[in-house]
C-alpha cells in the first residue's frame, strides 16, 4: 500500500462519518509558546478543545505534519522519526468513548483488515483521584478484543494532561500492533520496549478538569483527540520491519546510495536512516510558508543542529562535498503532490542548505583549531577532559568522534565517560526546558494572553502601515508576561519608526474598537483584504478577526472583545531574529 492510498482511506472513512477535513497546519505553531514545533494534530486545535467554536463544526479529521525531537536519540531504530505525519480525528463536545473506540476499531479491522488478534490495547487503571476507565475496557471487550489483549496502566502510560498545573485532562486508550515475536519476559506488554508491540493509535478522552486544590471535576465539554502515525501503520500494512522501508523514506535511502556510492547495509543502516530522516525533517521545516532559517535560538537552533548532525554523519560515510540538496530534491519529489509548498519553496530550501553547509564547514575548521589548542596544553599521560570535549561539541559543533581522532593522532585519550555525563546533563536540561515550555502554553489560556494575542494583530497592522506592505508575520510567541512578534524586514527598525508604531497601536486601544469575528470562505477573506499566508493550511471556512480601521486577519482566536481592554502598549525591544527577519518584544 502506498502512503497516498492510506491517507485517502483514512480521510474518506471519517468524512463518511460526519467529520470535516481540515488541512495540515504549519510546522511552526502560530501564537503558541507551548512548543517549538507542531508535535501533534491537537496543537493547532487547542482553542477549540478549550471551547472555541470551530467554523467547520464539532467533528474534524486531517493528516498533520509533525516534528518531534525529544526522541531524537532513538531515530534510526524501527519506528522513531523526527518528522512524521499524524492521522487524526477529533470530537469537540460531540461523540465520546464508544463512538471513538468503535470507529478506530472498524478502520483497523474492516478497512485495513488487521486481524483482531494482532491488536493489543492499553487502558487507564485508575488511582486515588480518578477511577479506572472501566467504560473503555468494556467497549473493547464488546468489540471482540479478548481479555488477555487488554492491559491496564497508570498515568505514565494512559493519561493525558493537564498541560499545566490545572485544566482539561483525561485517560487515554492506546492501540498497539503485536508483531508476533516472543515476549521478552512474563511481564512483557505494550509498555515494554523490547519491540514486540508497536504503538499505532492513541485515543485521548478529555473528560476531567483538574482544579487548583488537586481535585478533578467533570468537564462540560468532553473532547476526543486521536492520533495515528502514518509511517508506522504504513510499515505494518506493507509487511516491512521498519518505517524506513515504505515509499515515504525508501527512495531517500536509494538516492543516498546512488550519490555516495555507499551501499545500505547492516553496517551503514544507522547512518542512512538518520540522514534520510533528518533531511526529510529539514526539508519540511525549510519548506514551511513561514520561511524559518537556521539560527542560534529556538526553532532555528533545532534546524541548524539537524543540518549539522546530518553533515557529520555524511562525513562518517566518507562523503566529499555537499549532497544535501540532492537528497532534499528527492524529499520534495516524494511529497510535492500532497504538500505543494515544498516545490513552491524549493529554491529557498536549497539555498539555505548550501549556506548552512558552507558555514558549518568553517565551524569545523574553527573547532579543529580549538581542539589542537586544548591538546597542545596536555603532557604525556594526561587526557583531554570531558568538560573541554563537551565544550568543543556544544560551542563549536565539533563532533566527539573527531575530537577522539585528533587526540589519538597526537597520542592522547579523551575522558569519554565525563563527556557522556555532560551530554546527558545537557539533554536533561533541554528536556525539562521543553516540558516547561509545553506546560506554559497550553495551560495558559488566561485573559492576559488573550489580550496580547489581539495586540499582535494591532502590531502587525501598525508595522505594515509604517514600514510597508512587504512586512509579513514570520512567527509569534505569547505568554502572560509579554508578546514576541517576528516579521519580515531587511534592516533594523529605527527608534522613530518604533515610536510611530507604538502610537498607532495605542491610538487603536484608546478608540475602544470592537473586535469583530466573522466566518467566511478563504476566497471571501482574500477579497476583503484579510491578511494570512494563503496556502493549504487553511480550511474552506475560516475565522476572520477585524479591528475596524486597523486590522483584518485570518486567525483561530481567542481575542479580546474590545481594544480598550488592552490598556496601553509598550515596545520593550527590537532586534534581529535571523536573516531578513526582525523581532519585537512588547507588553500591555
Image (cartoon, rainbow, N blue to C red):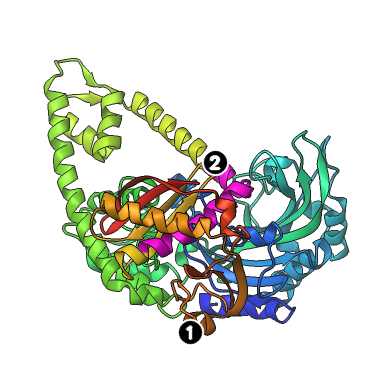
392 relative to 552, above or below:
above
Q: Nearer the viewer, residue 144 or 446?
A: 446
Residue depicted at x 14% and y 42%: 365
Is residue 380 left or right of 448 when viewed as pictured?
left
Q: Nearer the viewer, residue 256 or 278?
A: 278
Which of the 4 image quarters holds residue 199? bottom right
Residue depicted at x 39% and y 51%: 299
- The image shows residue 518 at horizontal and vertical percentages of 62, 74
- The image shows residue 306 at horizontal and vertical percentages of 35, 52
Q: Nearer the viewer, residue 341 or 496?
A: 496
Report the magenta stretch's main SS.
Answer: helix
Residue depicted at x 39% and y 74%: 341
For the N terminus, the quadrant is: bottom right
Which region of the structure is painted magenta? 437-463
Tell me if residue 66 is in the magenta stretch: no
Decide: few, some or many residues near mark 2? Use Cα within 10 Å; few <14, some 14-19, many ≥20: some
The answer to whether one can see residue 79 in this image is no
Which of the 4 image quarters holds residue 89? bottom right
Mark-to-mark CA distance, 1 and 2: 41 Å
Q: Which residue is mark 1?
A: 527
Q: In the image, which disc is placed on residue 401?
A: none
- Determine whether the residue tagged by mark 1 lies in a helix, strand or loop: helix
Q: Which residue is mark 2?
A: 435
- The image shows residue 37 at horizontal and vertical percentages of 47, 55
Amino acid at each position: 500500500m502506498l502512503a497516498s492510498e492510506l491517507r485517502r482511506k483514512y480521510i474518506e472513512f471519517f468524512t463518511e462519518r460526519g467529520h470535516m477535513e481540515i488541512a495540515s497546519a504549519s510546522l511552526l505553531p502560530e501564537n503558541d509558546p507551548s512548543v517549538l514545533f507542531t508535535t501533534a494534530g491537537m496543537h493547532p486545535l487547542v482553542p477549540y478543545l478549550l471551547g472555541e467554536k470551530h467554523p467547520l463544526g464539532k467533528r474534524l479529521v486531517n493528516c498533520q505534519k509533525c516534528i518531534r525531537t525529544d526522541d531524537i536519540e532513538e531515530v534510526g531504530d524501527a519506528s522513531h522519526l523526527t518528522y512524521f505525519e499524524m492521522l487524526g480525528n477529533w470530537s469537540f463536545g460531540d461523540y465520546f468513548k464508544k463512538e471513538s473506540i468503535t470507529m478506530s476499531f472498524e478502520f483497523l479491522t474492516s478497512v485495513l483488515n488487521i486481524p483482531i488478534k494482532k491488536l493489543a490495547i492499553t487502558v487507564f487503571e485508575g488511582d486515588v483521584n480518578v477511577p479506572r476507565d472501566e467504560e473503555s475496557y468494556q467497549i473493547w471487550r464488546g468489540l471482540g478484543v479478548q481479555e488477555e489483549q487488554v492491559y491496564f496502566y497508570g498515568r505514565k502510560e494512559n493519561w493525558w494532561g493537564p498541560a499545566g498545573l490545572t485544566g482539561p485532562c483525561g485517560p487515554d486508550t492506546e492501540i498497539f500492533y503485536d508483531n508476533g515475536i516472543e515476549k521478552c519476559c512474563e511481564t512483557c506488554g505494550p509498555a515494554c520496549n523490547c519491540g514486540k508491540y508497536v504503538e499505532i493509535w492513541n485515543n485521548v478522552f478529555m473528560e476531567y478538569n483538574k482544579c487548583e486544590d488537586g481535585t478533578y471535576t467533570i468537564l462540560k465539554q468532553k473532547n476526543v483527540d486521536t492520533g495515528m502515525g502514518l509511517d508506522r501503520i504504513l510499515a505494518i500494512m506493507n509487511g516491512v520491519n521498519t518505517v524506513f522501508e515504505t515509499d515515504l523514506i525508501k527512495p531517500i535511502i536509494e538516492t543516498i546510495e546512488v550519490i555516495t556510492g555507499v551501499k545500505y547495509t547492516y553496517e551503514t543502516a544507522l547512518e542512512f536512516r538518520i540522514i534520510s530522516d533528518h533531511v526529510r525533517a529539514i526539508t519540511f521545516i525549510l519548506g514551511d510558508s513561514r520561511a524559518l532559517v537556521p539560527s542560534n535560538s529556538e526553532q532555528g537552533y533545532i534546524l541548524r543542529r539537524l543540518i549539522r548532525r546530518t553533515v557529520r554523519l555524511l562525513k562518517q560515510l566518507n562523503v566529499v562535498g555537499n549532497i544535501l540538496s540532492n537528497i532534499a530534491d528527492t524529499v520534495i519529489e516524494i511529497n510535492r503532490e500532497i504538500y505543494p509548498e515544498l516545490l513552491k519553496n524549493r529554491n529557498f530550501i536549497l539555498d539555505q542548505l548550501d549556506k548552512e553547509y558552507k558555514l558549518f564547514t568553517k565551524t569545523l575548521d574553527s573547532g579543529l583549531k580549538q581542539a589542537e589548542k586544548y591538546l597542545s596544553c596536555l603532557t604525556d599521560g594526561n587526557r583531554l577532559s570531558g568538560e573541554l570535549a563537551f565544550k568543543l561539541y556544544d560551542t563549536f559543533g565539533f563532533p566527539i568522534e573527531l575530537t577522539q581522532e585528533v587526540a589519538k593522532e597526537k597520542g592522547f585519550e579523551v575522558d569519554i565517560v565525563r563527556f557522556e555525563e555532560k551530554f546527558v546533563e545537557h539533554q536533561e536540561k533541554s528536556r525539562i526546558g521543553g516540558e516547561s515550555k509545553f506546560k506554559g502554553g497550553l495551560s495558559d489560556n488566561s485573559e492576559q494572553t488573550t489580550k496580547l494575542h489581539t495586540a499582535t494583530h494591532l502590531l502587525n497592522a501598525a508595522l505594515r502601515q509604517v514600514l510597508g506592505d512587504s512586512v509579513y508575520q514570520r512567527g509569534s510567541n505569547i505568554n502572560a508576561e509579554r508578546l514576541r512578534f517576528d516579521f519580515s524586514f531587511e534592516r533594523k527598525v529605527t527608534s522613530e519608526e518604533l515610536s510611530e508604531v507604538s502610537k498607532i497601536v495605542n491610538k487603536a486601544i484608546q478608540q475602544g474598537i470592537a473586535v469583530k469575528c466573522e466566518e467566511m470562505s478563504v476566497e471571501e477573506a482574500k477579497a476583503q483584504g484579510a491578511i494570512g499566508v494563503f496556502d493549504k493550511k487553511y480550511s474552506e471556512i475560516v475565522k476572520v478577526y477585524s479591528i475596524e480601521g486597523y486590522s483584518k486577519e485570518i486567525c483561530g482566536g481567542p481575542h479580546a472583545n474590545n481594544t480598550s481592554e488592552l490598556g496601553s502598549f509598550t515596545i520593550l525591544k527590537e532586534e534581529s531574529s535571523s536573516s531578513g527577519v526582525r523581532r519585537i518584544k512588547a507588553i500591555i
